[in-house]
Image (tube, rainbow, N blue to C red):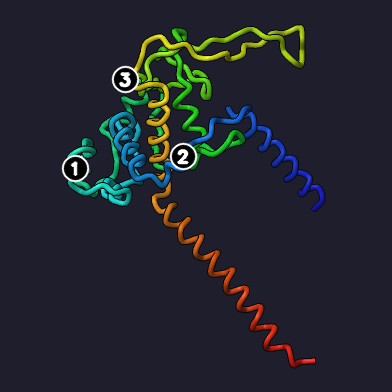
Amino acid sequence: MKRLIALLMAAFAILGVARASDGASTAWDKFPQQKMTDLGALQNGARLFVNYCLNCHAASYMRYNRLRDIGLTEAQIKQNLLFATDRVGDTMKVALDPRHAKEWFGAQPPDLSVIARSRAGAGGSGADYLYTYLRSYYRDDTTLTGWNNLVFPHVGMPNVLWELQGQRSARFVEMKDAHDPGKSVHRFAGFEQITPGKLSAHAYDEAVGDLVAYLQWMGEPTQNQRLRIGVWVLLFLALFTVISWRLNAAYWKDVK
């Protein structure tokens, strides 16, 4: 039994180290969580998702008509967001053939239905990861796509939002390794804008925040309702505890 417990503890320790080193050695930027209750932000995020992500990435567990939960009418969905299918009740699929995707990109682009829930790590939540990832692209002529990413080095996906953000290069400097002065390491020293995008830096960050808010909402469309109900449940339990405590005191007061 002791040996089994020791093996389990060692396994958890190894998993913990692996997770901490899995692209999350430093904390990610914080996603603006207030966007989760902003219907305008969620609607803009849905528009960005359909226009920039749904060309390659499916969301096969999300139906278009579920977008009514964020304030869109069926007519708005059909007119502005329904490009990959004819029926508003269909799921968000793509026309990209999986065989062609594997040939062009080396692998089939992942389904994004629950991407925000699957990317949580030592650096923060899944939304934090996506918010940092989509703002960390830079030009790199040594890669096949011509793009690289600080959060996901040598990623196969190019920067699909480049026309909004513009093109940037990353500046690195040589620094002495703190653990071994005889060695030097590359340290990121900032981005340099090559060509401007359609949006300013602040507006682009806001747009990415909207997109990530939609991705997080898509992973659990009822989460805002769940949180509201949870608050009322906790308030009810607190009140019920006080009432139960007083009833218990009144019932036993005459018992010696």
Q: Secondary structure at mark 2?
A: helix
Task: Quickly name the residue at label 3.
Answer: 198
Residue 100, percent from left and from top: 31, 25
Q: Residue 160: which quarter of the image?
A: top left
Relative to 149, does residue 42 appear above or below in the rendering? below
Task: Quickly name the residue at label 1.
Answer: 78
**Is residue 103 something that shows in the picture?**
no
Front residue of 201/139: it is 201
Q: Residue 134: which quarter of the image?
A: top left
Kindly report which numbered mark, 1 or 3, lies closer to the viewer in this rendering: 3
Front residue of 28/179: it is 28
Residue 147, percent from left and from top: 43, 15
Residue 108, percent from left and from top: 38, 29
**Is residue 101 something that shows in the picture?**
yes
The residues tagged by marks 2 and 1 sit, at their Cα atoms, a distance apart of 26 Å
**Tag 3 near tag 2, CB within 8 Å:** no
Which callout, 2 or 1, points at the residue further toward the start of the chain? Answer: 1
Residue type at tag 2: Ala
Which callout, 3 or 2, points at the residue further toward the start of the chain? Answer: 2
Which callout, 1 or 3, points at the residue further toward the start of the chain? Answer: 1
Task: Quickly name the residue at label 2.
Answer: 116
**Tag 2 near tag 1, CB within 8 Å:** no
Question: Which residue is found at the position 46% from the left and 58% from the top?
Answer: 228
Relative to 84, does residue 255 appear above or below in the rendering? below
The residues tagged by marks 1 and 3 sit, at their Cα atoms, a distance apart of 26 Å
Residue type at tag 3: Lys
Front residue of 165/25: it is 165
Give the position of the C terminus as an image quadrant: bottom right
Q: Secondary structure at mark 1?
A: helix
Residue 202, percent from left and from top: 42, 25
Mark 3 closeness class: few <14, some 14–19, many ≥20 residues within 10 Å: few
Q: Secondary structure at mark 3?
A: loop
